[in-house]
Image (cartoon, grey):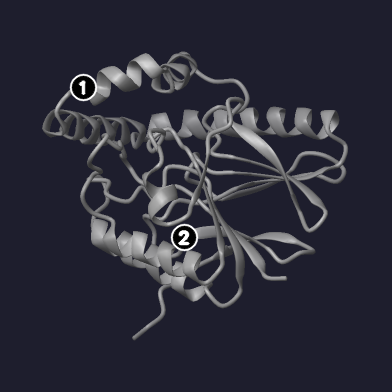
Amino acid sequence: MGKVFFLSDTHLGAGAHADPGAVERRVVAFLRSIRGEAEAVYMLGDVLDYWYEYRNCAPQGFVRFFGALAELADAGVKLYWYAGNHDVWLYGYLSHEIGITIVDPPTGGDFRILDGTEFFLGHGDGLGRQGLFMRVARPMFRSRVSRALYGAVHPRWTIGFARWWSRRSRAQGSRPEKQEAFHSRTLATLTEFGTEMSRKYPDLRYIVVGHYHSALELHVGENCTLFVLGSWDTETPVYGVWDGTEMRLAAFKMPKH
C-alpha cells in the first residue's frame, strides 16, 4: 500500500503572492516528487485562490498544476479535492477532465477510514465556532440562487472583483494586531472542536484541516490528534503524510537543479 498525502492553502493565482509562478512550480514539484509512493492525495481546500466554472468556460491559468494532477491520476493515484472558502465553486470540469473527486460536505468535513484508521477531513472554515461573516458567507456561497446570479455576470467583472476582495482580505489580516487576535481565537476554536470530536467519536484518531495557514499539531484526546496543514507561500511549506501506521507533518523543499 502506498502513502496518503494531504495539502491545502496553495492559493494558486493569488495576487498577494510575491511570485505566483514560484508557488505553482513548488506545488508541481511536490506532486511529481510523490508520484512513485502516493496511493492518494487529499487537497483540503483553497488550492486555488479563485475558481468559478461557467457553463462553457473555466478560468485561465494553472496549466502546469493541472498537468501534474493528471499525471498522478493517470498513474492510478486517487485524487480528492475538498472545497474551501476560496475554491467553493467546483463543479464537474475537473472531475471530467482529470478524474478528481470533488468533496464539499455540508457540515464542513467528513469521516474517512484509511488503512483501518478513522480520520476526519475538511478545509476548516466551517468547523467550530465561527464569526458572523463566515456563518453568513458559507451557506450563501453554496446557495443555488447565489451561484446562478454570480454566473450571470460576465467574467471580466467577477474575476476582477474576486481578486480584489482576496487582496483586501489578505492585507487586513496581515496586520500584527489582527494576526495575534486571530491565532489566539484559532487555537481556542480548534482545541474546543477537537476535544468535542474526540469525546463524541472515541474511535477517531486524526483530524486534518487547512484554512489557518499555520502548521499545527494538537493533541485533543487520549487517542486523537488534530493537524493543521501549512500554506504554500513559503519556501518550506508543510503538508501531511499517512504511511499506514502514523500520521505526521513534513516540510517540502524544492530540489536544487
Residue 152 to residue 30: above or below: above
Based on the displayed image, in which of its 4 quarters is residue 29 positioned? bottom left
**Image location of residue 218, percent across then percent down:** 70, 45
**Image location of residue 84, percent across then percent down:** 46, 37
The label shown at residue 237 is: 2
**Helix, strand or loop for disc 2:** loop
Looking at the image, residue 78 sits to the left or right of residue 255; the answer is right
Based on the displayed image, in which of its 4 quarters is residue 241 positioned? bottom right
Residue shown at 58%/31% (left/top)?
Answer: 105
Looking at the image, residue 38 sits to the left or right of residue 63; the answer is right
Q: Residue under label 1, please give it.
A: 152
How many marks can you see? 2
- Front-most of residues 191 and 96: 96
Q: CA distance from mark 1 to mark 2?
A: 37 Å
- Front-most of residues 202 and 172: 202
Residue shown at 43%/32% (left/top)?
Answer: 85
Residue 49 to residue 141: above or below: below
**Image location of residue 40, percent across then percent down:** 60, 61
Based on the displayed image, in which of its 4 quarters is residue 91 positioned? top left
Residue 126 to residue 222: above or below: above
The label shown at residue 64 is: none
Residue 4 to residue 144: above or below: below
